[in-house]
Amino acid sequence: NGQRWQLHYTRTGLLAEETRIDGIRLCREYDACGRLVTLREYDLSGSEEHVRVTRLTRDVSGRVTEKTLPDGKKIRYAYDGFGRLISADDGEWPIAWQYDRRGLLTAEHQGPASLHYQRDTT
């Protein structure tokens, strides 16, 4: 059918640009450590006027602490002292995770709902 998915990489081997079969173009920007910081999604016109931008803010350890969506909405992430994700808060439906002493996920909570996990030790 003549359709192609095109991928272009940086000199260091990171995916820089992708053109999907539907013609949507995605451009990625990375920080000096090679971690994704910006994703730009262009519509079929390729116009800067209609570009959708998602930005990631990271802490000194490289963990994502905030994601800014194309509509300006922000999702904030928090981690415990072991670097495990413990919460994601979009201002509407925050979610929290709990872990046991071994670092295994034991529960997740969102709004009035909770899921608890148990492992078979046999």
Image (cartoon, grey):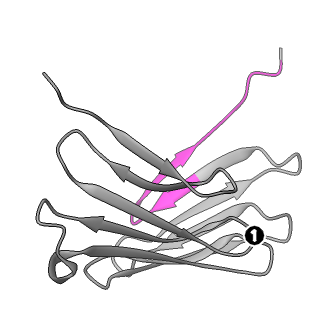
Give, as a three-letter code, the residue at label 1. Answer: Cys
Q: Position of residue 75 (x, y in %)?
A: 45, 76
Q: Position of residue 20 (x, y in %)?
A: 28, 44
Farthest top residue?
Answer: 122
Q: Is residue 45 magenta?
A: no
Q: Is residue 119 magenta?
A: yes
Q: Position of residue 110 (x, y in %)?
A: 44, 62
Image quadrant assignment for residue 66: bottom right
**The residue stretch that appears in magenta:** 108-121
Q: Which residue is drawn at the image coordinates 68% and 57% (left, top)?
A: 98
Relative placement, left or right, of 48 versus 10 is left
The residue that label 1 is drawn on is 33
Relative placement, left or right, of 9 versus 59 is left
Q: Which residue is drawn at the image coordinates 25% and 80% (left, top)?
A: 71
Image quadrant assignment for residue 72: bottom left
The residue closer to the viewer here, 83 or 39, is: 39
The residue closer to the viewer here, 28 or 75, is: 28
The residue closer to the viewer here, 89 or 42, is: 42
Seen in the picture, residue 19 relative to 111 is either above or below; the reply is above
Q: Quadrant of the C terminus?
A: top right
Q: Quadrant of the N terminus?
A: top left
Disc 1 on helix, strand or loop?
Answer: loop
